[in-house]
Image (cartoon, rainbow, N blue to C red):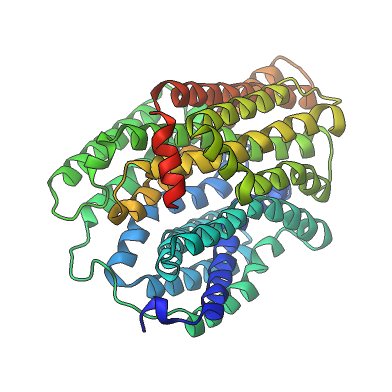
Amino acid sequence: MPPHSMDDRRRWLALMVLCLGVLMIVLDTTIVNVALPLIREDLGFSETSLVWVVNAYMLSFGGFLLLGGRLGDLYGHRRLFLHGITLFTLASLACGLSNSQALLVAARAVQGLGGAVVSAVALSLIMNLFTEPAERAKAMGVYGFVCAGGGSIGVLLGGLLTGALSWHWIFLVNLPIGVAVYALCTALLPDARGHAAGERLDVGGAVTVTAALMLAVYAIVNGNEAGWTSTQTLSLLGVSLVLMAIFLFIESRVQHPLMPLRLFRLRNVSTANVIGVLWAAAMFAWFFISALYLQLVLGSTPMQVGLAFLPANLIMAAFSLGLSARLVMRFGNRGPLSFGLLLAAAGLALFARAPVDGSFVVDVLPGMTLLGIGAGMALNPLLLVAMSDVSPSESGLASGVVNTAFMMGGALGLAVLASVAAARTGNLLMAGISTPVALTAGYQSAFLVGAIFAVVAAVLGAVLLRGRAQAAGSMTRA
């Protein structure tokens, strides 16, 4: 049954179910942040190894996004979506029952794999369900709202479940949602062959790029403990670079590449991806490190941390549901993107001066508000720029590439900034400074580096992106 023959009500129901599946994935990037100190205490993680509870998820998620989208093209999007939901739900069960560091980190990595497949395929399914431009724009607005609003729901739900029950429940809550999404998708989504059925899968490309990125992050996360110039760190980074070179060689030769390199000859596409990496590095640092600052320095409960993130996430959601599109129509992509990134940088700079005895209203809320406005303003134009020069037949691939840039920027940025914070804190503790003061100084250093990332991204956007005519054109087409 072709997608356009589905009756209207059924299509919108299918969209809601797809968005529920995506929401579950988005939740799991932020829901964990609130529970991190409790997980650290319970399972005995160190400050730097704690990053792996987030990074194991982010890395396998980012590593498998391109592959997930490609598998959907080959074997059918509905089938892959259902496989992804099943894998994610089972991994959530394993996370919830974890009683050791190794089991939790391994289960988080499998969760990331399931999440990558769901995210990569959901967008294609929505594009296939809604072929009319006006309807598609509305559907993408709902999808964008779920992606932006999911962050705030995750932090709030994380605070609520951790405070009322235990950290295990932030994972177990996925079980009923996963079962419901699977059942409803089976009933509502049309089963169709993949667009690229019969083509070969670029296995070499998938293996090399995933391994390269994982080794790089592993080297960075352990940089503090092993030493930045140690044989371990340098050899891991060396192997990672060699694997990345092999990946690029494979992509230039293979008939059906995982990531066609010609995309990066398009200036807006490559600039948008570099900005995506830098911005994600700054944003994930904000989520991760401010949650630690609120709990370990200011002594907030998990629930209070959840509420602290609410203003920023509500602002982001409001922008994604309409304000951002209006700004792009009025000013093009370049202005709102660069200005939004500068506002986010200012928010991070405010956090970089947050003191040991800080208060929520004076030291946390202003930074959170600026970050919310900045992120909300920049997200839509960044995605539009990433897609603006690409032919419609490659729009799914381009969205996979920019998603990968986001996830990798987040994982690498988090590794770098957690290492910066840990190094500064460690030096001060050795000098006999008290723990709260040493922790605060470490977090301040990390926020400052995050602010620099955001400023560099804003400057790149202002200098390298092409003008607004194309931007307005791509908006009216959407």
Q: Please state if 65 lies on the left or on the right of 343 as rendered.
A: left
Number of marks:
0
In which quadrant will I find the N terminus? bottom left
Residue 426 visible = no
* Image vertical order of residue 34 relative to residue 238, above or below: below
* Image vertical order of residue 225 relative to residue 7, above or below: above
Residue at x 64%, y 55% (from the top left corner): 150
Q: Along the line of sight, which residue is nearer the eye, 425 or 312? A: 312
* Image vertical order of residue 432 relative to residue 87, above or below: above
Residue at x 62%, y 72% (from the top left corner): 177
Q: Along the line of sight, which residue is nearer the eye, 32 or 190? A: 190
The spot of residue 189 in percent (x, y) is 46, 79
Q: Please state if 170 lies on the left or on the right of 227 as rendered.
A: right
The spot of residue 392 in percent (x, y) is 31, 54
In this view, the residue farthest toward the top is 431
Residue at x 50%, y 85% (from the top left corner): 187
Q: Please state if 446 lies on the left or on the right of 412 as rendered.
A: right
Q: Along the line of sight, which residue is nearer the eye, 117 or 241? A: 117
Q: Please state if 76 lies on the left or on the right of 205 as rendered.
A: right
The spot of residue 79 in percent (x, y) is 38, 75
Residue 106 visible = yes
The spot of residue 264 in percent (x, y) is 28, 37
Residue at x 80%, y 63% (from the top left corner): 165
- Name the image quarter holding residue 288: top right
